[in-house]
Amino acid sequence: MHLPISRRKFLSLGAGLVTTVALPRISYSDEKHISEYELVAAPTESPIVGEDYPETAVLSYNSSVPGPEIRLKQGDRLRVTLLNRIDQETTVHWHGIRLPNAMDGVPYLTQAPVAPGETFTYEFDLPDAGTFWYHPHVNSSEQVGRGLYGALIVEEPEVLQRSDSLEPIYQRELTWILDDWRFDQTATIQPFGVGHDASHGGRIGNVVTINGRLPQPLRVRSGERLRLRLINAANARHFALVFEGHSPHIIAIDGQPTVPHSPDDDTVVLAPAMRTDLLLDMSAEPGSKTRIIDSFYRDPYLLNEIVYSSETALRTSFPDPVALPGNPLSEPDLANAHRYDILFAGGAMGGMRGALVNGRWKDIRSMVNSGLVWAINGVAASSHELKPSLTLQRDKTYIFSLQNDTVFPHPIHLHGHHFRVIRRNKKPTKHREWQDTVLVQAREQVDIAFVADNPGDWMFHCHIPEHMEAGMMSVVRVV
Ligand code: C2O
Ligand code: CU
């Protein structure tokens, strides 16, 4: 990775930059369990790379990047009033939340876009505990890329304790929102809308941040067990995290609990928009240091350090991790499933000849002239004003067989539902994970299964916004 900002700078910052965001909660009613928030989308300046550089002009919710962490309990109701103070239309999409279609935040499809100066109130219940996030669904490459995103944490209703010892299942939890930025030497965000990004791997930046700042060392005590909630808010950067000398347990993916397990090669892979909850056993010696390396791309780099205090270890061995309580998801009925093959095509070196655009065949050259380079089942979407490409019957089980016929990885996201990832290249997956976004590697085939139990028109798209905005999106209707 080429960083215009030197490695030394990256590592020399002290711990003084941790920002806490004032909780904008305006009211909480105990009877109705409604949490009410206000989110103001507005331009602001933020010291993303620290005090040695000018502050960066960003877009933010409530003047901070990331926006405020919204935190409530499973079963609660959330009411959020969005006030748009940026100079473009916007919306808020509640990524991964199974909510009524009208609250999904997709312009034209589920609501009118919110014009500058206008407000929109979202209100819905939170059926699932887990790690979710929110972001706009208008001009996403730029709006998310300039800093509009935040965490939405839905806590389990009870304090999680081990049944054998009544000990909590972790001692401490942290949320890390990963992002990257494409900066010049003055920490100014470089222009959006680069054609090469759209036709290749998306907009990949040159500075990686955690919670909107250069990574600050993770300070721990030996013997602690941490719950680390990772959220990948980057437009296009994938992460493959190695916690040297540690063996993380994955306990949830995209908010949904999974059987606690170590990932393959002890490497935690996060495609854009994905979340992973880890239990991290701080098993190294007091006073030691270890590294967190991101090895997704050819040149691995140091993402962050773990710094152990000199305090004596709380313990030296860790009990087996306990699974989180499950969420109320409908189990797919695979024996009676209807299967659809879904082909993702296009992009540089993809060899696509053309696709249907607004119902008309266009060859690849005229597609490119209108900014389109990708297609799903032969259709390139030119806006969110889409007719459904599939109509699903409510409460029936569907298998989507996703075939990536391109040379780039694509994180494919379905709104309003979670699905089980059941097969990769025809081989059953070990954990049949519930996810809302699945990484489909170049030339890979991934089968997902779900019950279409949420009526409405739902986006189904690649979560790299440069791909989505260049054709890789569609709409699935549940009736
Ligand atoms: Cu994270 Cu269509 O959304
Ligand atoms: Cu893509």
Image (tube, rainbow, N blue to C red):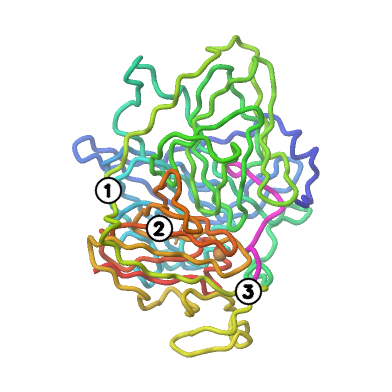
Secondary structure of the residue carrying tag 3 is: loop
The disc, 2 or 3, on the residue closer to the chain's N-terminal end is: 3
The residue at which mark 1 appears reads as: 125
Magenta stretch: helix, strand or loop mostly: loop
Q: Could you give the CA–CA distance between mark 3 and mark 1, rounded to whole angstroms? A: 42 Å
Amino acid residing under circle 1: Asp
Q: Which mark is residue 448?
A: 2
* Mark in front: 2 vs 1: 2
Q: Is residue 471 above or below residue 16?
A: below
Q: Which residues are magenta?
A: 199-212
The residue at which mark 3 appears reads as: 350
Circle 2 residues within 10 Å: few <14, some 14–19, many ≥20: many
Quadrant of ligand 1: it is bottom left
Mark 2–mark 1 contact, CB under 8 Å? no
Left or right: 351 as drawn, with respect to 160: right
Q: Is residue 382 visible?
A: no
x, y percent for residue 60:
53, 52
- The residue lying at 60 percent from left, 88 percent from top is 366
